[in-house]
C-alpha cells in the first residue's frame, strides 16, 4: 500500500459533531465565491479540487477522498458500468468523482441517493457546476425507499456497480433489498467504504460468507436477519440529529448469490487508515 501524502491531509475530524452543522452550506458558498468560478464551471476536476481545498483549510468533510476514490475510479474504468448507484452522497464529492468516471467510461446514469434534502441540494448544485447533470440523478429520501421507488418506476432495472457510503448498519439491509429485487445479480460489483474506520463487521461477514453459510443463517432466524445488532450505539446514532433514529427492515436477500470479495487498504482524507471492500457477484447457485 502506498504511503499517505500528509500535505494533502484534510483538517482533523472533530470528536462529536463533524457534519450537519452548517459546514455543507458553507462549502457551497466557498466554491461559488471563488475568483476562478468561471474556469471551474464544467470542469469536475476543478470542482473536486475546490472541495478538497475547503476540507484541508477550513473544516473536515466526510468525503471518500483522493486515495480511496482512486480505487473506485479504477474499478469504474475496468467495469464500465452503464448504471452506477451510490448510497449516501453527502456533499457530492464521490458523485462528481465517480459520475465523471462513469461518463468517461461510456456509462449512462449515476444515481446518488441521499437522505438529507440539504445535502442533496448541495450535490445537485455542484454536479450542475461540474457539468455532470446529464449523467447524475440525485434522489432524496431514505436509501431503501429510494431504491424501491426507482425500481417500481422502471428507472432502475439493474445495478452494474454500487458504492456504499451511507448509514453503516444499512449496508447489509440495502444490499439484501437490491438482491431481492434482482437489481444485484451475477456481474454486479460492490464497493463499500469505511469498512475499517469505523468498520462494518455485519456487512463484511455477509459478502464474505459462502452460500451454505448464508442459507443456514436464513433458516436459523426464520428468514429475518437483524440489521446491525453489533454496531456500537455511537455509530448507529450519528445520524439521529436531523432525521431521527433510522428504522431498518429485516431482510432475507438472496443467499444463493456468490461474491468474490477483496479488501483494498487505503486512507481516509485525514490520513487515517481505512479500506474499501470490493465484492464481485460471480455466480448464483441453484
Image: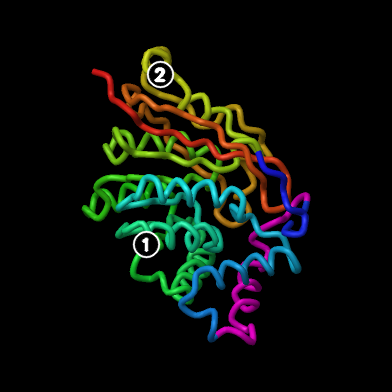
Mark in front: 2 vs 1: 1
Residue shown at 47% from the left, 48% from the top = 74
Q: Quadrant of the C terminus?
A: top left
Q: How many marks?
A: 2
Residue shown at 35% from the left, 29% from the top = 253
Is residue 182 a member of the stretch shown in magenta?
no
Crowding at dot 1, Cα within 10 Å, few <14 / some 14-19 / many 20+, comes out as many
Left/right placement of residue 24 relative to residue 15 reads: left
Is residue 21 a member of the stretch shown in magenta?
yes
Left/right placement of residue 251 relative to residue 155 reads: right
Q: Is residue 61 above or below residue 70?
A: below
Q: Is residue 217 above or below residue 239?
A: above
Q: Please provide percent x and percent y for residue 60.
A: 71, 59
What distance separates the C-alpha of mark 2 from that of mark 1?
A: 36 Å
Left/right placement of residue 126 relative to residue 55 reads: left
204 or 66, which lies in front?
Answer: 66
Residue shown at 65% from the left, 73% from the top = 26
148 or 103, which lies in front?
Answer: 103
- Label 2: element kind: helix
Region of the chain picked out in magenta, as a range: 15-37
- Label 1: element kind: helix
**Which numbered circle lies on residue 74?**
none
Which residue in the structure is indicated by mark 2? 214
Which residue in the structure is indicated by mark 1? 103
**Which image quarter: residue 209?**
top left
Crowding at dot 2, Cα within 10 Å, few <14 / some 14-19 / many 20+, comes out as many
Residue at the front extreme of this rendering: 2
Q: Please provide percent x and percent y for residue 241.
A: 63, 54
Looking at the image, tell me whether mark 2 or mark 1 is earlier in sequence order: 1
Residue shown at 45% from the left, 45% from the top = 75
Q: Quadrant of the N terminus?
A: top right
Amino acid at each position: 500500500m502506498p504511503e499517505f501524502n500528509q500535505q494533502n491531509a484534510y483538517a482533523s475530524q472533530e470528536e462529536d459533531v463533524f457534519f450537519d452543522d452548517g459546514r455543507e452550506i458553507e462549502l457551497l458558498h466557498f466554491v461559488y465565491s471563488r475568483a476562478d468560478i468561471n474556469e471551474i464551471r464544467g470542469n469536475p476536476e476543478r470542482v473536486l479540487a475546490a472541495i478538497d481545498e475547503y476540507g484541508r483549510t477550513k473544516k473536515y468533510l466526510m468525503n471518500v477522498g483522493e486515495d480511496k476514490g482512486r480505487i473506485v475510479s479504477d474499478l469504474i474504468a475496468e467495469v464500465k458500468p452503464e448504471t452506477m448507484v451510490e448510497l449516501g452522497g453527502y456533499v457530492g464529492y464521490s458523485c462528481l468523482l465517480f459520475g465523471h468516471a462513469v461518463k468517461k467510461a461510456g456509462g449512462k446514469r449515476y444515481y446518488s441517493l441521499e437522505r438529507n434534502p440539504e445535502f442533496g441540494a448541495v450535490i445537485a448544485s455542484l454536479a450542475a457546476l461540474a457539468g455532470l447533470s446529464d449523467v447524475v440523478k440525485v434522489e432524496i429520501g431514505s436509501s431503501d425507499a429510494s431504491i424501491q421507488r426507482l425500481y417500481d418506476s422502471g428507472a432502475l432495472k439493474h445495478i452494474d456497480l454500487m458504492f456504499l457510503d451511507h448509514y453503516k448498519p444499512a449496508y447489509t439491509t440495502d444490499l439484501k433489498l437490491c438482491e431481492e429485487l434482482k437489481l444485484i445479480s451475477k456481474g454486479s460489483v460492490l464497493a463499500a467504504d469505511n469498512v475499517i474506520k469505523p468498520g462494518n463487521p455485519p456487512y463484511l461477514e455477509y459478502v464474505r460468507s459462502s452460500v451454505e453459510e448464508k442459507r443456514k443463517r436464513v433458516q436459523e432466524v426464520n428468514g429475518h436477519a437483524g440489521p446491525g445488532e453489533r454496531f456500537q450505539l455511537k455509530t448507529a446514532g450519528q445520524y439521529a440529529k436531523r432525521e431521527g433514529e433510522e428504522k431498518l427492515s429485516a431482510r432475507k436477500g438472496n443467499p444463493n448469490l456468490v461474491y468474490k470479495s477483496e479488501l483494498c487498504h487505503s486512507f481516509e482524507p485525514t490520513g487515517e487508515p481505512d479500506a474499501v471492500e470490493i465484492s464481485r457477484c460471480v455466480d448464483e447457485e441453484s
